[in-house]
Image: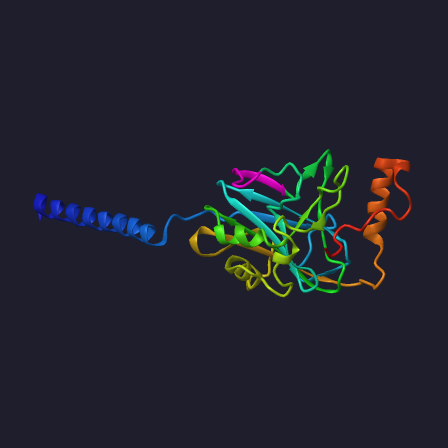
Amino acid sequence: MGMGSTSSRFRSTATITLCAVGLAFGVQWLVGPVTAAPRIEWSVAESAVQPFSEVKPYTPVRCTLELDEPAFVYAVSFDLMSGALALFPSETLRSDVVANPLPAGTHAFPGRHLERTLSWETSDANGAMTYMLITSPEPLDELQTVMKRMRQVGNAAFPQKPLLGNYAPAVGMDEVWPRSDIPSAPLRAAFGLEEYDHDGPMVPLPDGVHASALRLLIAGATAQQGGLAERVQGELQRELGSVLSPGSVMTPGAPK
């Protein structure tokens, strides 16, 4: 038993350790690098909500995203009346949120502009509405291309830009997807998430992609929904005063 036995045990331990290290590296090579899950918190009318909460039309929606690493971020909403809308990136959004890829840190969406906090707003039609946010360590080229054919949500048309409306994309309305389509694999994956808890660590998808889906039920819409038009009129009257004549403002988000 002596030195020979001790040396044999040492060699056995070293062999097991090397095998374990090799297996770990092999697994990492097969599945790719492990990406830390971003964390997200959704806010509806300034508060946290439960999945499938019932809310009124034009309710403000925001989210805060925490990234441990730089990431490409994409946000889209979907309901059967409006279809898929590009929230971020959006050709018409003017805010302090930087362009993709976003650096590590905390990011508030849709951001602030001219000292005002912006918000997305729920649909003016009764029914289910889903907000989807996707992160990826690499650009999702197919999703970026798809989003250019969606109506864009932004604030480019307003003097102080406090309200976000729906705009035609640069490619024109003839190129917009049918309203019943969710025209992207990552979006369909996010839409179909079986994880209903929308706050906290985001749900992992293949290739280091993560997703979160906020699901709401819009209720209380009427055939003569005037809340948004009245707010827009008020904002523009404050900014432009007597330049505007009564009835001269079109409601943002009206179909184009």
**Is 207 on the left-hand or right-hand side of 192?**
left
Q: On the image, which quarter does residue 225 sit in? A: bottom right
x, y (%) of residue 17? 24, 48
Q: Residue at x 27, y 48 (%)?
A: 21
Quadrant assignment for the C terminus: bottom right
Q: What secondary structure is the magenta-colored segment mainly?
A: loop
Q: Is residue 102 above or below residue 77?
A: above
Q: Nearer the viewer, residue 72 or 216?
A: 72
Task: Read off the magenta span.
Answer: 99-108
Whether residue 136 appears in this view of the structure is yes
Q: Is residue 235 left or right of residue 181?
A: right
Tell me which residue sits at (55%, 46%) in the image.
73
Residue lying farthest to the top in this orientation: 114
Judged left or right of residue 192, residue 112 is: right
Residue 4: within the magenta? no
Residue 75 placement (x, y as % from top left): 60, 51
Q: Is residue 101 magenta?
A: yes
Residue at 63% across / 63% down in the picture? 178
